[in-house]
Amino acid sequence: MFLLLRLSLRNLFRQKRRNLLLGSAMAIGVALLVLANAFSNGLTDIMMNKVLRWVTGHVTIGVYERGRMMSQVFRDKTVFDFVRKDFKDVLLESEEAIGVMVRGIGNGKADNLILVGVDIDPNEVLDEKALKEMEESFHLVQGRWEDLNDARYENPVILSEDRCRYLNLKLHDVVRLRLRNIFGQDQAARATVVGIMTTGNIFMGPVVFGNVEQVKTLLGYDEHSCGSINLTLKEPQKNARWVADAIHDRLQAPGLAAIAGTAEAEDGRRARALVMGFNGNSTEAQALAAHLEILAGSMEKTRLDKAAWVAQPLARELGVGVGSALSVRYTDKWGAPTGNFTLRVGGIFRPGKQWDPRAILLTDHRFYEAFYAHWPRPITTADGFVLPGKDHPDYDFLSPEWIMLPRTYTTEDMMKKARELGKGKWHATVIDIGTMYETAEEILKMQGVLNLITIAAVLVLFAIILIGVVNTLRMTIRERTREIGTIRAIGMQRSDVRNAFIYETMLLAFFSSIMGVLLALLAMWGLSSITLNMSDNPMGMFLVKGHLYFLPTLGSVAGYTLLIMVLAGATAWFPARRAARLAPGAALRHSE
């Protein structure tokens, strides 16, 4: 084999001009293929790793209180404590996605901004890769990231250089922020510019970074609440989906939401009570009514008035009837007796064997207002209450602690789920687990389409080039006919003659591919060195720091080189086989 390779290499250099022209055409084709692939990879990398990776993380635990997309808050952050422990082997970072649209007012100018809370841990040591990614996306030109934790500054923030220029702001200037908190209330705050940064992509231009705890305070979060959670993983393509599935499985069976408290009537009589919510949907409410022995009141009127059903023994103890008012006090999960709400009795029912005689059933709209205002402490056997179990015939009508949306794996299904969420049909907090690969499925499809178009176009080009390979090889065989006869006469086998020509063509394709790759790298260097000013142009999404971004990969370069060599070898097969079948005697007698 090595002898054949040496022979093929010698023959390749014997006809330099012809092979140089043919090789140049192949090199241009390879260069176009590698360049287009690197550009599409770069676009995907920009969206996936320089935008979505910072905005959503690799896996997102989305929380929407009472089913409202603009109210991303969960009142008991300890529910998610298992994430750090169970996935510590693949988890790089877990952070809250605290962000809000704000109106920033500078010195004589105003602009729309996105205030994002970040957790700058002074004790955290980032590895070289993480530092490089941070520097590429957010490069500080003035100030320090650590100043976001400096108590000397009022609400310290870091803005992009472009926004500071537009708002006429300098380092340590005050910018006024107008925002809407998680309760829907309009707020105003002063913030101090402690850093100015350049951003790697146009999408990050409006982002303003602030200390996460201070941002949460501005938005109305308390110390026990959290927002949506973004997880950054090691090897995200390998780990993101199974991590999302595992978290979904862990959270998809919440417990029954219930409040153990003390009910008080208007005349001051008190009694222990167990408050639960029920589905206020008309169909569901009527189905529940069919299971209850109603003694007074109307289910439909109770549902429309957002009133409560009270078990007969509790109603007697409190001396209340339909239309009476009750107040309920309870202790939250952290031991503070802060829970307090009022309700009106809409009906009385006789509790069956599986109902607690001190039960109060409240429509879910009103119930969740109380439940999430101060997350109540868990009910234990010491309380003496009977909670309906999953085998209870009315369990499905009662309110859970939260609602888990089903997992989806495509952008289309994810959008359908978002539209359902936007309808506001849930009163409970809704949790949705997703990965950035589902969010960006269309981007990945776009990359595949671009690669497919590129390959198709280049294959057409190579089809034309390979016709030239066939013609060149036939001419070469004709010129070497007597040489073929000689080597066949001294004992070379037909298969060796055939393989020698195939190897020669594949070597030409190999060297052409190497030159094509080098040409592509040179073109990438030249194109990416050109600075393009597209700060106000949507085409700026294709740029990183004002430059075109290419991302060639070793796998794609090697794959394309192998593809071209295989195509060249397959094209050379038939002319080479014809040369191998020449009779030695006839070949020796050949003359031009």
Image (spheres, grey):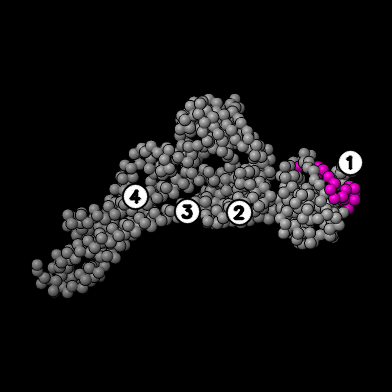
Q: Are marks 4 and 3 in contact (CB under 8 Å)?
A: no
Would you say residue 41 is visible in this rendering? Answer: yes
Of marks 1 and 4, which one's residue comes earlier in the chain? 4
Element assignment for label 2: helix
Residue type at the position of mark 3: Glu
Q: Nearer the viewer, residue 3 or 414?
A: 414
Q: Quadrant of residue 200?
A: top left
* 406 in the magenta segment: no
Q: Are marks 2 and 4 in contact (CB under 8 Å)?
A: no
In the picture of the structure, the residue carrying the numbered disc 1 is 268
Label 3 – label 1 distance at C-alpha:
62 Å
Question: Looking at the picture, does residue 167 appear above or below residue 269?
Answer: above
In the picture of the structure, the residue carrying the numbered disc 2 is 420
In the picture of the structure, the residue carrying the numbered disc 4 is 35
Label 1 – label 2 distance at C-alpha:
44 Å
Which residue is painted at 78% across and 47% down in the image? 259
Residue type at the position of mark 4: Leu
Where does the magenta region start and end? 313-333
In the picture of the structure, the residue carrying the numbered disc 3 is 442
Residue type at the position of mark 1: Gly
